[in-house]
């Protein structure tokens, strides 16, 4: 039997930083299969490292605050690429630092997928921009389809390239 896939949306209740949470909400609305475990998390610290243990595939989704790409672009990254990205975190001890700590502790999952939705700014508003909301909805659909395909074929699905937006 295949271990369940865990998808964690990282974010906050504010503006485009909700991107990871919006993906989880989109997946939950689609009534996902029991083999897909969904969580929303507001701080990517030591709790995240613990949550990633003893799982099958782990997918992390977060907003990436950057001026290098337009808002609403979905990117697949490695932890090293995230650490080198020209970005900042609204979470204090950010995702890049958490993954670096997990690596140093030999606690990174064997099958880790890191996805980011680019944003231009954070705000205290609770409304997401149209570009980021659209990207989150499309990413939720892609993840569900990839999971269903992987379960049907017995393999692990993948998500597009690291330089294209979800379509």
Image (cartoon, helix red, strand yellow):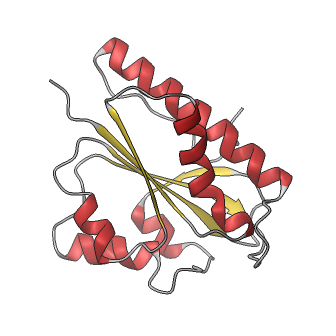
In the rendered image, residue 33, in percent from the top left (x then y), is placed at 39, 25
- Of residues 135 and 33, the one drawn nearer to the viewer in this rendering: 33
- Of residues 34 and 101, the one drawn nearer to the viewer in this rendering: 34
In the rendered image, residue 140, in percent from the top left (x then y), is placed at 59, 38
In the rendered image, residue 78, in percent from the top left (x then y), is placed at 43, 58
- Left of 149 or right of it: where is 26? right
Image quarter where the C terminus lies is: top right
Please, is residue 98 above or below residue 135 in the view?
below
Please, is residue 109 above or below residue 66 in the view?
above
Please, is residue 110 above or below residue 107 in the view?
above
Please, is residue 38 above or below residue 1 in the view?
below
Residue lying furthest right: 130
In the rendered image, residue 100, in percent from the top left (x then y), is placed at 33, 75
Is residue 93 shown to the viewer in this render? yes
Image quarter where the N terminus lies is: top left
- Left of 51 or right of it: where is 79? right
Q: Residue at x 24, y 70 (%)?
A: 103
Is residue 164 shown to the viewer in this render? no
Q: Residue at x 72, y 64 (%)?
A: 16
Residue lying furthest bottom: 92
Q: Residue at x 69, y 61 (%)?
A: 118
- Of residues 138 and 29, the one drawn nearer to the viewer in this rendering: 29
């Amino acid at each position: 039997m295949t271990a369940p896939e865990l998808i964690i949306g990282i974010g906050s209740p504010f503006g485009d930083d909700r991107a990871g949470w919006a993906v989880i909400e989109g997946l939950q609305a689609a009534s996902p299969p029991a083999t897909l475990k969904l969580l929303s998390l507001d701080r990517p610290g030591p709790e995240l490292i613990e949550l990633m243990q003893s799982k099958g595939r782990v997918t992390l989704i977060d907003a990436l605050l950057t001026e290098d790409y337009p808002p609403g672009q979905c990117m697949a990254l490695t932890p090293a690429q995230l650490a080198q990205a020209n970005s900042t975190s609204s979470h204090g001890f950010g995702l890049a630092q958490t993954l670096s700590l997990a690596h140093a502790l030999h606690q990174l999952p064997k099958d880790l997928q890191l996805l980011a939705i680019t944003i231009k700014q954070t705000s205290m508003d609770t409304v997401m921009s149209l570009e980021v909301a659209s990207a989150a909805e499309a990413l939720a659909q892609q993840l569900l389809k990839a999971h269903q395909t992987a379960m049907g074929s017995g393999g692990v699905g993948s998500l597009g390239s690291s330089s294209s937006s979800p379509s």
